[in-house]
Every structure is written in structure tokens, then in C-alpha cells.
């Protein structure tokens, strides 16, 4: 009896999957921007993307993703809904291949659309996928440059930049000295509009510092990344004159309203970035690239313990913030 029940359940599940696939095919036919039923079809696709099984179904249907991308890139009613469905579907690893193929119509939206940046960030989460997303952005990743040139870059652009910089190819694009990408990243470290953007930008800069050859350029007068990295860590406290004189000029006379970066995670990444570029004026032989230096086991254990303590402090801080917000509600 149990075997018969299992067999019946399997048949019902297979029948349900087949029906869902058929329904999605019918839905895809209605997603043309010229179709009067396109907005309703986009709403149905968005509802479908709200469940794990629905996202998996969309991810396995390149025609549906391509139709949604074409609609999202149009000026028709329902375009935003179609894009929201795509963002949800992009969380599925299986969506990588079909969405990369469907990207071209969406690329012009990168500079102004947080949703498209979020979609690309989802696709580039895994290090092995980041180079493929970078190549899909075209020669020199031009959409990224246009996005960074805007008055208010989308908050989701930070996560995209951070993910792309996981790969050496992404770091090379960002560090290309013929293009003003890093100079446009540095001011965003202090972006007042979005902690999400600041977090991603600092993460991207930290990743770029794994390229040892770029350190001298980052610290050079042509770029002066050091003050930009230090400023968010500076507070309003007054320092003794002899200590003030040792700081870069940009940090010597700060206004009383100066405040440190409030996010512990961003402060930690800023410190990690500084540790990767500040290796001393005249490093010892074999110490020029700290990323290749063998760390003694005892020191490694000590550093690991310090990291764990900092993470625990950050968890406590976040819990306190959540409790304070709950009390305010």
C-alpha cells in the first residue's frame, strides 16, 4: 500500500510539473511588449518567482527569461514587474546560463537601474561566475563606467563591483589606469545615501589591493587613496599637535561634526584594505608582498582569535541595534 501511495504521489508530482511547464510556455507567449495581456503575464511571472519551485521553473526556461528581459528593457507597462521577476529568478544558480544570454537588452539600463545591478550582482556571486558576467558587460565593462559617472549610482552597484572584483579580470578592469574607475570609487566610500553602496565599494577596493603591483599607484599623489580610506575611520576627537602633524593634510583639521563610519563591517573592511597597502616605506627582503609572506602558526592563531572576537562584538552590536529598533516600533 505504501509503495502504491509513493507511486501515486510521484505521478501526481510529475503531472503537476508538466502542467506548470505548459502553463509557463503559454505565459511566455503573452510576454511580448506588444501583447495587450503582457502586464498581467508579467504579474503572473513575478508571482511565480516568489517561490523556490517557481524560480527553479523560470531558471530552466530560457525562452521565458529572454521574453522577460525583452519586456523589462522596453518602455511598456509591466516592464518593472518583468524586471522584478528576473531579479528573483537570478538568485537560482541554474539561471546563470540563460540569463547571460538574455542580458544584452538590459545592459543600457545598468547606469540607472538598481534592479539590473542587483540582477548582475546575483549572477556574479560565485567567483567562477564573475568573469563571465564581466565579459557579458562588453569591452572595458563600459556600463560600469557610466554607472559610476552618474550623480547617484544605484546602491546595488556596490555589491556588483565587489563581486566582480573577486576575479583577477574584474580587478584589472577596475585598476585600469587609462579609465577613471578607481577615482570615481573613492568618493563613494563616504556616500551618505546608502550603506549598501559604501559596503560594496569598500569591498571592491579591498579586493583590488590583492593586486600587489597596484599599491604604489593607489598611494601615489596622482590618486591619493590613503586619505579617502582613512577619513571614514576618523572621529571628531582632538589629537595632540605632534600626532596631528603626522596625518595627511586632509585629516588634520576635521570639522566637529565629523563622524566615523557607523557600520562595523565597513570599518573592518577599511582596516583590511589599509593593512594590504601599508607595508612600510622600505620593507625587508621577502616582505614586499605581504600576501605571499608565510605567517607563523602562533601569530595566525592569535589573529584568528582577534577576528572571532571582533565578529562576536559585531554580532552583539547588531543585536543591540535590532532590539533598539524593536523598542522604537
Image (cartoon, rainbow, N blue to C red):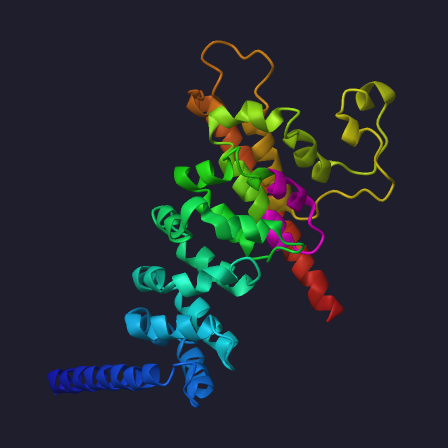
In front of the other: 294 or 217: 217
Which quadrant of the figure has residue 279?
Answer: top right
Q: Which residue is drawn at 65% across and 46% down?
A: 188
State which quarter of the image contains the C terminus.
bottom right
Q: Residue at x 42, y 52 (%)?
A: 137
Q: Where is residue 326 in the image (x, y as percent from the top left)?
A: 69, 67
Q: Where is residue 56 in the image (x, y as percent from the top left)?
A: 32, 71
Q: Looking at the image, is 75 positioned above or below residue 302?
A: below
Q: Residue at x 60, y 54 (%)?
A: 196
Which quadrant of the figure has residue 243?
Answer: top right
> Does residue 249 appear left or right of residue 91 in this picture?
right
Q: Looking at the image, is 22 positioned above or below residue 141?
A: below
Residue 57 seen in the figure: no
> Does residue 103 appear left or right of residue 299 in this picture?
left
Which quadrant of the figure has residue 41?
Answer: bottom left
Q: Residue furthest top?
A: 285
State which quarter of the image contains the N terminus.
bottom left
Q: Residue at x 46, y 40 (%)?
A: 173
Whether the magenta-drawn stretch holds residue 62 is answered as no
Figure label count: 0
Q: Where is residue 107 in the image (x, y as percent from the top left)?
A: 46, 60
User: What range is drawn magenta here?
Assistant: 183-199
Q: Main secondary structure of the magenta part?
A: helix
Q: Position of residue 209 (x, y in %)?
A: 51, 32
Amino acid at each position: 500500500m505504501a509503495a502504491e501511495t509513493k507511486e501515486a504521489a510521484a505521478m501526481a508530482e510529475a503531472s503537476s510539473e508538466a502542467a506548470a511547464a505548459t502553463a509557463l510556455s503559454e505565459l511566455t507567449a503573452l510576454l511580448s511588449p506588444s501583447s495587450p495581456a503582457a502586464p498581467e503575464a508579467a504579474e503572473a511571472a513575478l508571482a511565480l518567482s516568489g517561490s523556490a519551485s517557481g524560480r527553479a521553473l523560470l531558471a530552466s526556461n530560457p525562452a521565458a527569461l529572454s521574453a522577460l528581459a525583452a519586456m523589462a528593457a522596453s518602455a511598456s507597462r509591466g516592464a518593472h514587474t518583468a524586471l522584478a521577476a528576473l531579479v528573483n529568478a537570478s538568485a537560482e544558480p541554474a539561471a546563470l546560463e540563460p540569463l547571460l544570454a538574455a542580458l544584452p537588452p538590459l545592459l543600457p539600463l545598468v547606469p540607472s537601474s538598481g534592479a539590473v545591478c542587483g540582477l548582475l550582482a546575483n549572477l556574479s556571486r560565485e567567483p567562477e561566475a564573475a568573469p563571465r558576467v564581466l565579459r557579458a558587460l562588453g569591452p572595458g565593462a563600459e556600463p560600469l563606467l557610466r554607472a559610476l559617472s552618474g550623480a547617484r549610482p544605484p546602491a546595488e552597484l556596490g555589491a556588483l563591483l565587489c563581486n566582480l572584483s573577486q576575479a583577477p579580470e574584474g580587478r584589472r578592469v577596475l585598476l585600469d589606469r587609462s579609465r577613471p574607475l578607481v577615482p570615481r570609487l573613492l568618493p563613494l566610500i563616504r556616500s551618505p545615501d546608502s550603506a549598501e553602496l559604501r559596503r560594496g565599494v569598500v569591498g571592491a577596493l579591498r579586493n583590488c589591493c590583492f593586486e600587489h603591483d597596484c599599491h604604489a599607484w593607489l598611494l601615489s599623489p596622482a590618486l591619493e587613496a590613503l586619505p579617502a580610506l582613512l577619513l571614514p575611520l576618523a572621529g571628531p576627537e582632538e589629537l595632540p599637535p605632534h600626532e596631528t602633524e603626522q596625518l595627511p593634510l586632509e585629516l588634520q583639521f576635521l570639522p566637529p561634526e565629523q563622524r566615523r563610519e557607523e557600520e562595523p563591517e565597513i570599518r573592518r573592511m577599511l582596516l583590511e584594505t589599509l593593512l594590504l597597502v601599508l607595508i612600510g616605506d622600505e620593507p625587508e627582503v621577502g616582505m614586499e608582498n605581504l600576501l605571499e609572506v608565510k605567517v607563523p602558526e602562533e601569530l595566525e592563531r592569535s589573529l584568528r582569535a582577534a577576528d572571532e572576537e571582533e565578529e562576536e562584538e559585531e554580532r552583539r552590536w547588531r543585536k543591540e541595534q535590532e532590539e533598539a529598533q524593536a523598542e522604537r516600533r
